[in-house]
Image: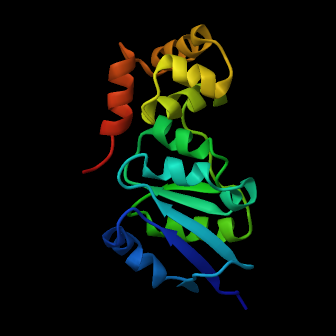
Amino acid sequence: MKERVGITLNVAADSYASLLASVLGRGDLYLSRTEGENLAHVFIDLPVSWAFEKLDGLNSVDRARTVVVIQGTNAAYSDIIASYHVSGVVSVGNDAEIVSSIYAAAASLRTYNWQSSLTYMELRVSRLLLKGYDTDTAARELRVSSKTINAHVSNAIGKLGFASRAQYVAALFGSHRS
């Protein structure tokens, strides 16, 4: 007999919870307000990059039990979220994948498969760009030089075929459904 899995749902606005209404009807999933066994954390990343601050506040054990539901399909953005070492990153509307990711997260299993060619450091730098950091602030945060930050940005832009940093950041923000 399959055990029920509890979900702690983390959203910027209560109305976003309706995006998972059909998921709760599948499997043996229920909303939980307590910590414990068989529990997965689900973050709905709306507005775009909302989950960053929340994921920053989680310890590694809780992140391993977390699924982040995003609204887009940009491979680099999905990888940026996954660079937090969460269990899974899934696009909204893919109910079957969301359900299976929730079950995996409850068991602290990592299900995410990297989609872009960016390195972990390029993903971390990209995350800081999305958070609004300038080069010097990102360098201080990561304890590297500004030159190193610029090199990682340049590498990411080149790998993904963008002409500029602004175009890259705009693409990460803009590749989501409205």
Q: Is residue 119 visible to us here?
A: no
Residue at coordinates 38% horizontally, 64% vertically from top-left? 93
Q: Is residue 98 left or right of residue 34?
A: left
* Quadrant of res 84: top right
* Quadrant of res 61: bottom right
Residue 60 position in % (x across, y down): 73, 53
Task: From this view, report whether residue 87 is shown above or below residue 128.
Answer: below
Can you name the residue that lies furthest to the bottom here? Answer: 1
Task: From this view, report whether residue 56 is shown above or below residue 154.
Answer: below
Residue 97 position in % (x across, y down): 52, 64
Residue 46 position in % (x across, y down): 37, 55
Say which quadrant the N terminus sits in: bottom right
Residue at coordinates 56% horizontally, 27% vertically from top-left? 125
Task: From this view, report whether residue 28 is shown above or below residue 39.
Answer: below
Residue at coordinates 51% horizontally, 32% vertically from top-left? 128
Q: Nearer the viewer, residue 61 or 161?
A: 61
Residue 70 position in % (x across, y down): 43, 54
